Amino acid sequence: MKFHAIVLPSGKNTSPNIPKLVFQLAATLLLLTVIPLLLNRTSHSPLPFSKINIHNLSIEFDKTCDIFSGKWVPFPKGLYYTNTTCNLIIDQQNCMKFGRPDTEFLKWRWKPEECELPLFDGFQFLELVRGKSLAFVGDSVGRNQMQSLMCLLASVVYPEDISYRYTSDTNFKRWFYADYSFTLATLWSPFLVKASDADPSGHSYNSIMNLYLDKVDEAWALEISKFDYVIISAGQWFFRPLMLYEKGQLVGCHKCQQQNITDLTHSYGYRKAFQTAFRTLLSLRDYKGVTFLRTFSPAHFENGEWNKGGSCARTRPFTMEELKVDQYILDMHSTQVEEQRAAAEEGRKRGLQFRLLNVTGAMLLRPDGHPNHYGHSRHRNLNMADCVHWCLPGPIDTWNEFLLYMLKGEGQMAPGRKLQQNA
């Protein structure tokens, strides 16, 4: 199960023959090899985090290594944390608390082709971000990664919740690690741009919304200059019905099913949203941070769509024969890669870094990592499976291994650059 993280093609000139195209792209771009090994089905007791000598496994940063090209390999040695050792896991991702019976999905680890990806070291991470601040901007999958990070750091220290100093809105949270003077935040913005309900009957899971593609969502934009690191992402919300506006005028829609309105597809609004978000970051005079675009996190619904009985009951990663890559995933990934590259080129003129946290390829192979029916939320119909978010602990912890690896290389990739500390 090997994935080569190369630039996926743009969907602008794609053939309508989707099954054939998906097969060709999967064969040529996602060069997978079957691992002829099954997980050891003997029960393994998770090792306490303190028993894993991660310092001995650390290596020097190699900026020539593509950590995103690799494969999942068996790793039965233990977990960073459990739902009993980390009390920061919300019910929506607390799969073991709500009775998930299998644990094999926890016994795999990402192995890059060209190097070793060190295990996450909470002490090392906190030293790297000492005196700094990091914000996750996006939807609940971004918040999912942040909660993974907090659990990974919990083996070192728990933070203080300081959200009340800023807002009573629970979608905007801040934590402070006093011993390291490090601030961690999540800024809710599922579209990155200004949005409002268009359905007069009110908001629902699939209600139509207005998107103002050339107007940034000020809920995050007015706060972001204070942060040294920003991880920006967006994805699943762009599949809902949308009315799309530019310069105050309706220019089209997506899935609106209204006559005389052009359907511009999800890709149009998706690209425009990232363009507006990056243009905003580039234009903020006081913003000196490093921006990471975390690429699209694929869902894995099978036997139906999310609202039509779809579920994700697999208990191990995909094999080559099982993997299917839908065209929309290729489109969304290529859109992100193209816009990140454009922002990075423009950012160099200002001394700003825009980097790619390229998780899509690795996560395509992990249909086993979602809560399915083993995550609970007061906002969710429990008859619906959650195949969008990721169990904690689970494969999403790999995203923060990627992040730490990239932070360790920051000095080598930008020698002499000093990031602005949180005011």
Image (tube, rainbow, N blue to C red):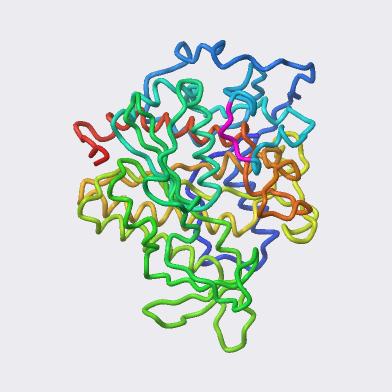
Residue at 73 percent of width and 45 percent of height: 372
Q: Quadrant of residue 14?
A: bottom right
Q: Main secondary structure of the magenta part?
A: loop
Residue at 74 percent of width and 43 percent of height: 322
Q: Is residue 116 magenta?
A: no
Residue at 60 percent of width and 27 percent of height: 109
All told, the count of numbered labels is 0
Residue 166 position (above or below residue 89): below
| Direction from residue 197 to residue 388 in the image, left or right | right
Query: Where does residue 144 sit, x and y in percent of width and height?
Result: 55, 42
Is the N terminus in the top left, top right, bottom left or bottom right quadrant? Answer: top right
> Between 240 and 405, which is closer to the camera in this rendering?
240
Query: Where does residue 246 sit, x and y in percent of width and height?
Result: 40, 77
| Direction from residue 300 to residue 132 in the image, left or right | left
> Between 403 and 268, which is closer to the camera in this rendering?
403
Query: Where does residue 99 sit, x and y in percent of width and height?
Result: 77, 34
Is the C terminus in the top left, top right, bottom left or bottom right quadrant? Answer: top left
The part of the chain drawn in magenta is: 86-90
Residue 418 position (above or below residue 293): above
Residue 61 position (above or below residue 356): above
| Direction from residue 399 to residue 107 in the image, left or right | right
Residue at 19 percent of width and 32 percent of height: 416
Query: Where does residue 90 sit, x and y in percent of width and height?
Result: 61, 40
Residue 85 position (above or below residue 240): above
